Image (cartoon, grey):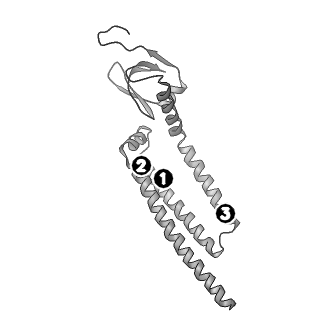
Amino acid sequence: MVLSEILQAQIINIVQFVIIVVIGLTLTKFITDALKYFFKRREVQKTISDMGYEAPLVDLILVTIRYLLYFITIIIALSQFGFATIVFNILIIALIVLVAFFVVYSLKDVISNAVAGVFIHITKSIKEGDNITVGVYSGKVQEITLMTTMLKDSTGRTIVIPNANLTRKEIIKEKALKKSGQRR
């Protein structure tokens, strides 16, 4: 009788293992496909290229996330057989903390630019059409996005300034001229 109970418990563990692996693989596929769709959107790709990053970095991030999710799925599935000891739990926590640190560290400029962009939009401290000087750059504000502000200088060049720079430096704002050439 004891042997049949042990066998029955192991069969249940195997079924649970298979279910967890199938669910984990399905969720991993769903999450990575959703992230791939997000990163392939034109606005996101423009933002990424504006920050100086290239497509291989996005692919590296997606592959890292995929394998991290595979790893977590396997650890959770192995717990059905009693393999998830405190060492595995510590390893998972350490890995999550490490990945979170690298993600936050690698996105620190993105986060600061995005927060600055939101701040600029909320305070309306500058708007399209304003003539401003930031540091050594002067020009007319052409576009304000979440990450950057684009100026057109007097020679017609487009200057892209990260929004974080706009909140860290003094902005000299001149009133925009009316079409007739008079000041407002």
Residue at (65% x, 61% y) in the render: 91
Above or below for 156 versus 179: below
Furthest residue in direction top, as rendered: 182
Secondary element at tag 3:
helix
Pinpoint residue 83: horizontal percent, then vertical percent. 65, 72
> Which of pointers 3 and 1 indicates the residue nearer the eye?
3
Drawn side of residue 79 relative to residue 31, left or right: right
> Which of pointers 2 and 1 indicates the residue nearer the eye?
2
| Contact? badges 2 and 1 (CB < 8 Å) | yes
Most foreground residue, 54 or 144: 144
Which numbered circle lies on residue 80?
none
Which residue in the structure is indicated by mark 3? 89
Above or below for 158 versus 68: above
Pinpoint residue 47: horizontal percent, then vertical percent. 42, 40
| Contact? badges 3 and 1 (CB < 8 Å) | no
Structural crowding at the residue carrying mark 3, measured as other residues with C-alpha within 10 Å and reported as few (<14), some (14–19) or many (≥20): few
Kind of residue at disc 3: Asn
| Contact? badges 3 and 2 (CB < 8 Å) | no
Secondary element at tag 1:
helix
Most foreground residue, 76 or 66: 76
Indicate which disc, 3 or 1, sits on the residue closer to the N terminus.
1
Above or below for 118 versus 36: above
Pinpoint residue 12: horizontal percent, then vertical percent. 59, 79
Indicate which disc, 3 or 2, sits on the residue closer to the N terminus.
2
Which numbered circle lies on residue 39?
2
Residue at (32% x, 22% y) in the render: 156
Structural crowding at the residue carrying mark 2, measured as other residues with C-alpha within 10 Å and reported as few (<14), some (14–19) or many (≥20): some
Q: CA distance from mark 2 to mark 1?
A: 10 Å
Kind of residue at disc 2: Phe
